[in-house]
Image (spheres, helix red, strand yellow):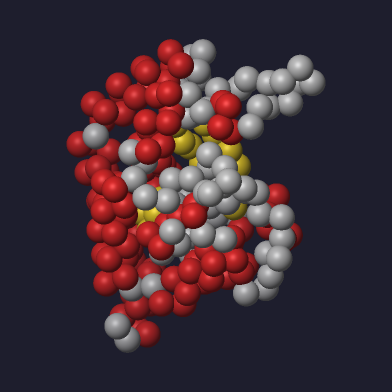
Amino acid sequence: MSSASSSIYIHFFKRVIDLLVSLIIFTVLSPVFIIVVILLAIANAGKPFFFQTRPGKNEKLFKVIKFKTMNDRKDKNGELLPDADRLTAVGSFIRRTSLDELPQMLNVIKGDMSLIGPRPLLVEYLPRYSEVQRHRHDVRPGITGWAQVNGRNTISWQQKFEYDVWYVNNISFALDFKIFFLTIRNIVKSEGISSDTSATMEKFLGN
């Protein structure tokens, strides 16, 4: 794809595709959405959703919405228990099937996110990125991305960021199309859900 064609795709067609596809997916899966909301409301004391501030394009902050797969159990000191101890049975299934990402279709529709792009991470990570790694914020964050289909939570943070920056520098319709179908494959195979040492992924502490 030429630089001109790539620019047109990034600044126009990518957003149109995001909007149309997310609306279709959300509409088709709305019965599943409702069932999951009910199950999680029961498992999490009436709290089926998880909201958190994340940095988006150009590091602009927004509220990401996900299904709440972990409860709020705390130890005797009032600190949250480790992720593995708070992950509910229904939450584990929802994570394994990647249904926890479904509410983010609303973020895509709103324009905070894209279907494909670097994952939106914690705000506390912003000062820890190198100058090269910061380029992952040059585009809208995605529900899935190049790092997710190349290891997700089983690869190191440095490798993830290398994949993210590579994506930003090589973004195209063909690449997004490839990532979309690799994501479906990974969901079916339940690959890369957890790291080797955590139920989710260890925090990024810097380079």
Q: Tell me which corner region of the image, top left, top right, bottom left or bottom right, holds residue 146.
A: bottom left
Horizontal side, residue 126 vs residue 36: left or right: right
Q: Position of residue 161 (x, y in %)?
A: 55, 66
| Picture residue at 41% right of the left edge, 63% below the top | 150
Between 144 and 26, the residue placed more toward the observer is 144
Q: Quadrant of the N terminus?
A: bottom left
Q: Position of residue 25 (x, y in %)?
A: 25, 42
Indicate whether 179 appears above or below 47. below
Query: Which residue reaches farthest front?
Result: 196
Query: Which residue reaches farthest right?
Result: 77
| Picture residue at 66% right of the left edge, 54% below the top | 204
Q: In this rendering, does residue 114 appear at all?
A: no
Query: Which residue reaches farthest bottom?
Result: 2
Q: How many marks?
A: 0
Horizontal side, residue 3 vs residue 50: left or right: left
Q: Position of residue 108 (x, y in %)?
A: 39, 48
Q: In this rendering, does residue 135 appear at all?
A: yes
| Picture residue at 31% right of the left edge, 28% below the top | 33
Horizontal side, residue 194 vs residue 115: left or right: right
| Picture residue at 53% right of the left edge, 49% below the top | 196
Indicate whether 119 appears above or below 10. above
Q: Position of residue 70 (x, y in %)?
A: 53, 27
Q: Quadrant of the C terminus?
A: bottom right
Q: Tell me which corner region of the image, top left, top right, bottom left or bottom right, holds residue 117.
A: bottom left
Between 18 and 143, the residue placed more toward the observer is 143
